[in-house]
Image (cartoon, rainbow, N blue to C red):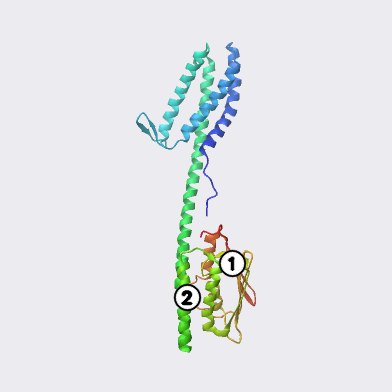
């Protein structure tokens, strides 16, 4: 559950915005100031063009950086809260005046011309005010993007934590569910065949050992799950004898694939709980794997009255799959067969 949304890059936004501002503002500035300089009999040469372009780009970068800043700024021992809009307004004004003073001083040193003493200077101030306002608007949009991104990340983290919490709750429900059904089975065997009940308890201890070992894992290999399936099906056969017939057709290449632990157990319990069957009309269960799927199908002879349950079977399993891989189980039902198909997971698409 990794985020595909990335935070807006501050450096890229500053550079791209500065280039756009330069393209939009430098052209009109050059056009207006060349006309004014012609009227004032001042030579508007290559230096003037270069200066206006560099000046526009440099001011855009400076004011964009200032207006996008949010971290505290330390100047001469004073800490300025850059999240305070009035502090930014003051800094914008001071920086604007300082830059124009330095520009005036610079040009006065190399040219017999003082911008503030001519119409050229007023045009420079006006166009630079437009430039500063442009950076303020861009910085405001940038802050909206950052705020939106931060809210997105917080929401994503909250959803992830909630999903993980739900997943842990679902996993913790497996053990009580398993115990309930096992004790129900033992209760049915004790009166009929005490020796078989003892053997069932021994099988149950082996099965429950697997339950404990896999309880901390999000996924296990299909090979491990099938070992458990063999032990668990032995328990079922002790109870139901020939009333249950299980067939397996597992492709060797799929044994390294992953499934949530106890997935097959949940499907077996679901088949037993919802169907009528006996030795004359057995419950036939077919489990097979191929490619990316594991399928368990059972003959359908649905009970009219369904046993009460904790309602955590297929619902639980489906939610575990959604948490692990954003995939879901597939359920198909015909007049004669009920089929559940589980996605087989790879290492990279599970969180194990």
**Can residue 117 be seen here?**
no
- Residue lying furthest front: 252
User: What mark, if any, has residue 140 been given in the picture?
Assistant: none
Across the whole image, how many numbered discs are drawn on residues?
2
Is residue 299 shown above or below 102? below
The structure residue drawn at horizontal position 45% and vertical position 69%, both measured from the top left corner, is: 212
Which of disc 2 and disc 1 is earlier in sequence? 2
Residue 280 figure quarter: bottom right
Q: In the picture provided, is 346 more to the left or to the right than 93?
A: right
Badge 2 marks a residue whose secondary structure is: helix
Q: Position of residue 191 (x, y in %)?
A: 46, 88
Name the residue beneath numbered marker 1: 255
Disc 1 to disc 2, C-alpha distance: 21 Å
Q: Nearer the viewer, residue 29 or 3?
A: 3
Q: In the picture provided, is 36 more to the left or to the right than 197?
A: right
Is residue 107 shown above or below 250? above
**Can residue 73 be seen here?**
yes
Q: Position of residue 115 (x, y in %)?
A: 51, 16
Name the residue beneath numbered marker 2: 206
Q: Position of residue 47 (x, y in %)?
A: 58, 17
């Amino acid at each position: 559950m990794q985020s595909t949304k990335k935070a807006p890059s501050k450096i890229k936004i500053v550079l791209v915005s500065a280039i756009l501002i330069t393209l939009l503002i430098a052209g009109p500035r050059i056009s207006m100031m060349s006309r004014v300089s012609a009227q004032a009999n001042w030579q508007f040469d290559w230096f003037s063009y270069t200066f206006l372009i560099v000046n526009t780009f440099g001011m855009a970068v400076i004011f964009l950086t200032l207006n996008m800043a949010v971290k505290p700024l330390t100047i001469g021992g004073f800490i300025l809260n850059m999240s305070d809009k009035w502090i930014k307004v003051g800094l914008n004004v001071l920086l604007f005046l300082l830059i124009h003073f330095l520009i005036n001083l610079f040009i006065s040193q190399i040219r017999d011309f003082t911008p503030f003493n001519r119409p050229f200077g007023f045009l420079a101030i006006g166009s630079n005010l437009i430039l500063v306002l442009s950076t303020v608007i861009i910085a405001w949009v940038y802050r909206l993007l950052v705020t939106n991104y931060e809210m997105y990340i917080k929401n994503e983290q909250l959803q992830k934590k909630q999903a993980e919490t739900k997943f842990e709750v679902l996993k913790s429900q497996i053990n009580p569910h398993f115990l309930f059904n096992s004790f129900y089975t033992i209760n049915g065997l004790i009166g009929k065949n005490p020796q078989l009940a003892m053997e069932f308890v021994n099988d149950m201890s082996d099965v429950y050992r697997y339950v404990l070992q896999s309880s901390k894992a999000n996924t296990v290999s299909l090979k491990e799950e099938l070992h458990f399936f063999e032990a668990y099906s032995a328990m079922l056969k002790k109870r139901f004898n020939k009333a249950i017939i299980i067939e397996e057709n597992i492709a060797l290449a799929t044994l390294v694939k992953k499934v949530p632990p106890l997935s097959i157990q949940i499907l077996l319990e679901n088949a037993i709980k919802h169907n009528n069957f006996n030795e004359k009309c057995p419950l036939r269960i077919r489990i097979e794997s191929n490619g990316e799927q594991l399928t368990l199908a059972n003959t359908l002879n649905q009970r009219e009255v369904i046993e009460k349950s904790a309602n955590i079977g297929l619902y639980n399993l489906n939610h575990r799959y959604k948490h692990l891989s954003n995939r879901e189980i597939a359920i198909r039902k015909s007049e004669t067969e009920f089929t559940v198909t589980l996605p087989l997971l790879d290492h990279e698409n599970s969180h194990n």
